[in-house]
Image: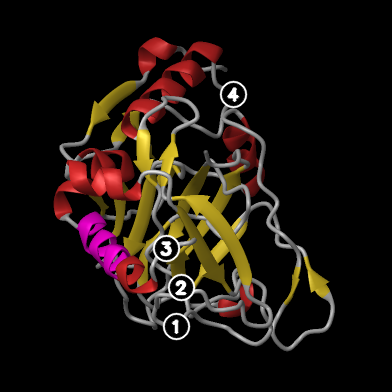
Amino acid sequence: MALTASRIEITPTDAALGAVITGIDVSRSVEPEVILQLKQIWRDRHLLIFKNQILTDDQLLAFANYFGDILQQPAYVRKGETEEYLPPLVLTLANAAPEDSSVNIRPNYQELLPHIDHYWLPVPSSGSFLYAVEVPENGPNTYWVNLAQAYDELDDATKQQIAGLQVRYFNFYGSRDRDEYGNPKYAAGRAPEPGERVAIHPLVRTHPDTGKKILFFNAASDVDIVDYDHVEGAKLVAKLQEHIKQPRFAYRHQWSKGDLLYWDNQATAHYRPEFDANATRILKRVSLRGSRPF
């Protein structure tokens, strides 16, 4: 049975982004008017929060496919192995059972700084779905940052300063030589290290659907600004790292089993604190193909 639009309820959060969607079972087929309604609120609020879902991997993929084509992450050779590994379309993010995790970077209980998914690709993802299979009772929470509001609230001088700037990002995705991130540093024109991926994106991005200006800034990796004074660039990056951490830009999500969150990766960053390494936390993630930032 398909769901009718009149049965869903949309409740915006009190935060800078996010809307809670109730009255929908996303494991079932969904009427076109419901999908269109969800797409509109996603454009407006950047983050959809579905509660009490029970999903197989195939059902998660089927629902995500309503909103775009599924992103296939690149193949790589995992640490300690010699054959290329192609990550599944549904990634498992598990800290308690790392052998079951689809992600080899960083022990999955350590702090994650504000980041944009797939910033290290020439064409980052447009959005991601994250489904809670099992989560600890006492957190950790995950925070999403509204990067459109973060741009809007910059002073005019800073907006003028960053207009047209290009940022170079470094990432060790798929490197057999690194299994965790270091503390992000200003790259200051350095050459990429062996196995390191590099991508260049505009610091101010135009949202492809809404036309809004976005502070498209990832604070979780080494970075520098192309053709820019290194001293001034380091100061600017440090200023933006602090700017996007301000609580007024963020939504804090306290996870429960069965939560499904779908966020706009073109207009948000997200982060979470470190948590107990012995706690069991298993999530499933599906990401959607995006377009080249402009």
CA distance for labels 4 and 2: 42 Å
Which of the two discs, 4 and 2, labels the residue nearer the N terminus? Answer: 4
- Disc number lying in front (2 or 3): 3
Badge 3 marks a residue whose secondary structure is loop
Position of 109 compared to 288: left or right? left
**Which residue corresponds to mark 4?**
29
- Disc number lying in front (4 or 2): 2
Position of 62 compared to 130: left or right? right
Given contact means CB atoms under 8 Å apart, are the residues at marks 4 and 3 in contact? Answer: no
Which region is colored magenta?
A: 235-245
CA distance for labels 2 and 1: 9 Å
Which of the two discs, 4 and 3, labels the residue nearer the N terminus? Answer: 4
Query: Given the image, on which type of amino acid does mark 2 rest?
Result: Asp
Given contact means CB atoms under 8 Å apart, are the residues at marks 1 and 4 in contact? Answer: no
Dot 4, how many residues are within 10 Å of its Cα: few (below 14), some (14-19), or many (20+)?
some
Residue 96 in the image, given as x and y percentages of width and height: 48, 77
Q: Main secondary structure of the magenta part?
A: helix
Query: Given the image, on which type of amino acid does mark 4 rest?
Result: Ser
Residue 214 in the image, given as x and y percentages of width and height: 36, 40
Position of 117 compared to 86: left or right? left
**Which residue corresponds to mark 3?**
228
**Which residue corresponds to mark 2?**
222
Residue 154 visible? The answer is no
**Which residue corresponds to mark 1?**
182
Given contact means CB atoms under 8 Å apart, are the residues at marks 3 and 1 in contact? Answer: no
Query: Given the image, on which type of amino acid does mark 3 rest?
Result: Tyr
Dot 1, how many residues are within 10 Å of its Cα: few (below 14), some (14-19), or many (20+)?
few
- Disc number lying in front (4 or 3): 3
